[in-house]
Amino acid sequence: MGDQDTGSVGNGLKRQLVESPGRQTKPSFHSWFRFLLLLCLVVFVLCYALSSSSSSWQSNFQLHHPYKWLFNHSKKVDMPPYRVHPKHRHILNEIQTTTEPPTVQPVGVRYHQAYPGNYHFIMDNTEVCSQNPFLVLMVPVEPSNVAARDAIRQTWGNESLVQGQVVVTLFMLGVSGGADVEKLQQENLQYHDLIQSDFVDSYLNLTIKTMVIMDWLATHCRTAAYAMKVDSDMFLNIDNLVIMLQKPGIPKRNYLTGLLMVNRPVIRTKSSKWYVPEEMYPDPQYPTYTLGMGYVFSNDLPEKYVEVSKSIKPFNIEDAYIGMCMKNLGLTPSSPPDPSQFQSYNSKYNRCQFSKVITYILSSAPQLVNYWTDLKKPGPPC
Ligand SMILES: *[C@@H]1O[C@H](CO)[C@@H](O)[C@H](O)[C@H]1NC(C)=O
Ligand SMILES: *[C@@H]1O[C@H](CO)[C@@H](O)[C@H](O)[C@H]1NC(C)=O
Ligand SMILES: *[C@@H]1O[C@H](CO)[C@@H](O)[C@H](O)[C@H]1NC(C)=O
């Protein structure tokens, strides 16, 4: 190949590089010039080899690039702009590991821990939303809490047609060491109502659970009109909820309602269940949010929550985190048409009262079954 004179300009140069030192015994002005040109080329190639092992020629040709590169790398230690003797390389490595905290996140983890894109569904029951439900009830529950799931399945979770509207109830689970995987799969085969994702199921991870619920709604159940995140220890008067959502004037978009929490202080008492360190959430107050026991939203919001959450630092109070998502979306939660329908605790069962509300927090699974059975018996409740 080198013998052919029909080669390109590049080949010609290469030949000169090989031939010129040997052949030219009497250097003329011409050959000196050529030599200088070659020297420049060699220096340039050397510089390039030093400067970059990963970036492309194209980006190196940008004029400003070498300066930026020098600036970046002389500060970063990990790849100095000069050659390092192998003997000293370990010292540089040590400097790097002791002075620089790891900035690179593990593969697959994006944005932050509560970003749902980090996790994968183990069970996702995609087909349950093919019937275009009016309302989807999403219940976060620990994998081992079969009693709570069974109580819900016997009561408000067993209502698939409410006031003429299709309602679906699903349980959201993470993974936990104590849970029997085969039993869960059996349970899902029987009821087709478990959604499970591969995050660690724990109290401090409830924000992850909520965001995975939002992710599931956004990716697996887009046709639903409304959804509700409702805790597993709740009494839910599902009829009243569907009646409320069908009232004229209830927004179909950007709508979040429940028991409103306004100007709530962030708990800084370390022993509290709701303690949040300042590093996680510096402001002394939360934005307006809806209490986590049960909040209802139009189903356009989950996708927006997932998107906006990318830039919202996570903290362990899931309902206030949704409040932050609303705030960052430029939205505020709405007061329900009748705020007295979203109640938290009730110390005594009263059939008439339970027939009027939408939510109450209960203390046990048998309580739910008892109250529900009593409420549904024939005869006027009041
Ligand atoms: C220099 O570092 C900044 C931030 O670390 C990066 O965005 C930029 O692309 C780097 N420039 C070069 C030339 O490597
Ligand atoms: C749900 O209700 C139906 C009747 O509508 C009943 O046959 C079924 O046993 C109930 N499911 C549970 C888990 O109680
Ligand atoms: C929360 O979940 C993540 C992801 O599965 C896990 O790495 C982390 O240990 C969990 N944290 C707690 C407190 O359970």
Image (cartoon, helix red, strand yellow):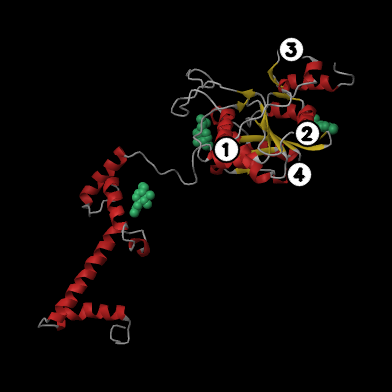
Task: State whether residue 68 appears in this view.
Answer: yes
Residue placed under numbered mark 2 in the picture: 248
Residue type, numbered disc 2: Pro
Q: Position of residue 34 (x, y in %)?
A: 19, 77
Badge nearest the viewer, 4 or 3: 4
Quote the CA–CA distance across marks 2 and 3: 33 Å
Q: Is residue 70 left or right of residue 33?
A: right
Work out whether mark 2 precedes mark 3 in sequence or the reverse, and give the earlier one.
Answer: 2
* Residue at figure coordinates x 82%, y 20% from the top left: 375
Question: Residue 225: horizontal and vertical position, in percent?
Answer: 73, 40
Label 2 element class? loop
Residue visible at 30% across and 46% down in the picture: 76
Dot 1 alpha-carbon crowd within 10 angstroms: few under 14, some 14 to 19, many 20 or more:
some
Label 2 and label 4: CA atoms lie apart by 21 Å
Instruction: Single out the residue that lies furthest toward the left.
Output: 26
Q: Nearer the viewer, residue 87 or 292?
A: 292
User: Mark 4 or 1 closer to N-term?
Assistant: 4
Q: Is mark 1 within 8 Å of ligand 3?
A: no
Q: Secondary structure at mark 4?
A: loop
Q: Is label 3 within 8 A of ligand 2 (CB to nearest ligand atom)?
A: no
Whichever of labels 1 and 3 marks the residue nearer the N terminus, that label is 1
Q: Separation of disc 2 and disc 1 at Cα?
A: 25 Å
Residue 185 image position (x, y, % from top left): 68, 39
Earlier sequence position, callout 2 versus callout 1: 2
Q: CA distance from mark 1 to mark 3?
A: 39 Å
Image quadrant where one finds the N terminus: bottom left
Specify the label residue 132 is tagged with.
4
Q: Residue furthest top?
A: 348
Q: Determine which residue is flagged by label 3.
A: 348
Looking at the rendered structure, the kind of residue marked 1 is: Leu
Q: Quadrant of ligand 2?
A: top right
Residue 329 marker: 1
